[in-house]
Amino acid sequence: MISTLLVANRGEIACRIFRTCRALGITTVAVYSDADADALHVREADTAVRLPGAAADTYLRGDLVVAAALAAGADAVHPGYGFLSENAGFARAVQDAGLVWVGPPVKAIELMASKTRAKELMAAAGVPLLAPVDPARATADDLPLLLKAAAGGGGRGMRIVHELDALEAELTAAGAEAAAAFGDGEVFAEPYVERGRHVEVQIMADAHGGVWALGTRDCSLQRRHQKVVEEAPAPGLDDALRTRLHDAATAAAQAVGYRGAGTVEFLLSADGRPYFLEMNTRLQVEHPVTEAVFGLDLVALQLRVAEGEPLPAPAPPEPHGHAVEARLYAEDPAHDWQPQTGTLHTLDVPAEPGIRLDTGYTDGDTIGVHYDPMLAKVIAHAPTRAEAVRLLARTLERARVHGPVTNRELLVRSLRHPDFLAARLDTGFYDRHLAALTPAPDDADRHLAALAAALADAAARQQAPGPAPARLGAWRNIASQPRTKRYRAEPDGTEHEAAYRTTRTGPAPETGERVVTARPDHVTLETADGLTRSFRIAVHGDRTYVDTATGPHTLTALPRFTDPTDRTEPGSLLAPMPGTVVRVADGLAAGAAVTAGQPLIWLEAMKMEHRILAPASGTLTALHAAPGLQVEVGALLAVVQDVDAQEEPQQ
């Protein structure tokens, strides 16, 4: 029996595993980097062990993790997902140290660790798959191609190639990203199936010959080849196709002598043909939707199997209902999905029946630059797909998330998009619909939010202690001048002004709304068309967060007068996020000629690479970036002088 379990991971998955351990009476051990010293998973564990070294590397140091387990008196190790979860060498080291490995056999990990070798094995087992393409011999007829890292997953090291001329550069970039993420730069190519669906089967196997195929999941809504929305069961599949997928997944598990939790992933072409993608020899991020539909705790089953017990029955329980999961990321979908950092002031998701929240953060935690930007997973379970989707969309809409920009509004719009509601799903969903899903905010809504923020600020000042002039409670029996307050809306930077007069009966907005209530944390307005709107207000520093029934607004209070020194040199390339400069364009130096759209600098943040492009054709007049340089958001990287600005004026 396992008595003390170390989780070789961080964040949400560590917290989720600890939850099951508490229910089973198992003592928990966390490991942490210096960047995670005060993280939620550290606070929730019974014991925590620091991993020395650079924050980006610590969770990848298997020797340190094994030493931590022994030092803490653990008798088992659970790898979670990501990091070392599919590293056969780490699994072997855990077992060599006399610890129980809560995962599949080392041999199964080795066989599936390389996607190229895995495909050969699956072909021999009769599992349908796409034939690989030799990049050195690729022709125009092979396009488009998908480049993938042979080791690892999560979308890292993946590139879609539409032009042969771009193949060599994309191979280099994919290999570099794969090497940085997984320590293995091997990349392979296969045909890219356009408008394909990502459908997978959850497997659970024991050491006694038992194998469960726990239904299907659809994970087609992806950005940068990483999943955003997942659901179970995958909608729109007929019984014959479901059976074929279950049989193929079972065959894949049996072919490698699998044990524990795993996932067999398939690409479903537009005409319904399935192709094997890979087998993930670990627990998946999206496992909660399967748990909800089957009424199971997959982590508890992992622990049971690791203890040598058989699965509790020859066949899994019958599924019931439908479950949908949305991943809440600290990122800005409207600006190239840029990851965001900073303090998460509030994470408040309504605890409705049928709603589950898995998170590694709580109020006041800091979202750093070193790890994946996922804040939480919100899961809805209901009798039907339509009910589950509706419940999840409304729950996300009502959630209060204060701090860095997130994809919350994108998730709500995605769940309500006609194609999603009709289950017209494929991996190109965001490529086609991103612009429609990230529209410019409604000016009328922003105006009301700014007005509510200004009125809440006035109420707070009225209640604040201090001499009478600092308060707004003494109304004079003469017409007052309008009081104005300016705000900058985040993240688009548009400015909004709220104006109201103080009267004997209270504040009166200049734009005609009637103030029903105005408190520091809550404002109610009646609009000109007779609608009553409520606004919940929270202030953190210079940021005001306004939550409404139709969505949130983040506002930054502006000074009455603009600082004339607040200027940026034209052509300045600023870091869009904190991160590390990983490379600059070959030969790039001050004085070099550049063309509009040319990649100049590569910045890595949260394990993803971001290219900084030349804003216009011209001359690079300054270069402040160099490989290895760590920069904060807004740091000046380079300056490009526009060609037009260099031209002499006509005489």
Image: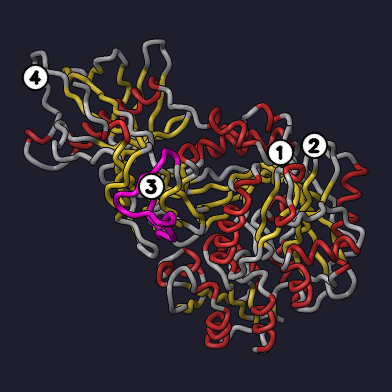
Q: CA distance from mark 3 to mark 1?
A: 30 Å
Where does residue 358 sit, x and y in percent of width and height?
A: 57, 54
Image depth: mark 2 or mark 4 in front: 2
Indicate the amino acid at tag 4.
Arg
Q: Residue at x 40, y 52 (%)?
A: 341
Q: Secondary structure at mark 1?
A: loop
Image depth: mark 3 or mark 1 in front: 3
Camera-nearest residue between 338 and 500: 338
Read off the magenta span.
577-597
Q: Which residue is mark 4?
A: 476
Q: Which residue is mark 1?
A: 426
Q: Which residue is mark 3?
A: 576
Lower sequence index among marks 1 and 4: 1
Q: Is residue 585 magenta?
A: yes
Q: Is residue 192 left or right of residue 174?
A: right
Mark 1: few/some/many CA within 10 Å (<14, 14-19, 20+): many
Where does residue 77 sit, x and y in percent of width and height?
A: 63, 77
Q: CA distance from mark 1 to mark 4?
A: 63 Å
Q: Secondary structure at mark 3?
A: loop
Q: Is residue 440 left or right of residue 321?
A: left
Q: CA distance from mark 1 to mark 2?
A: 8 Å
Q: Residue at x 53, y 82 (%)?
A: 64
Camera-nearest residue between 9 and 618: 618
Which corner quadrant of the image does residue 297 belong to? bottom right
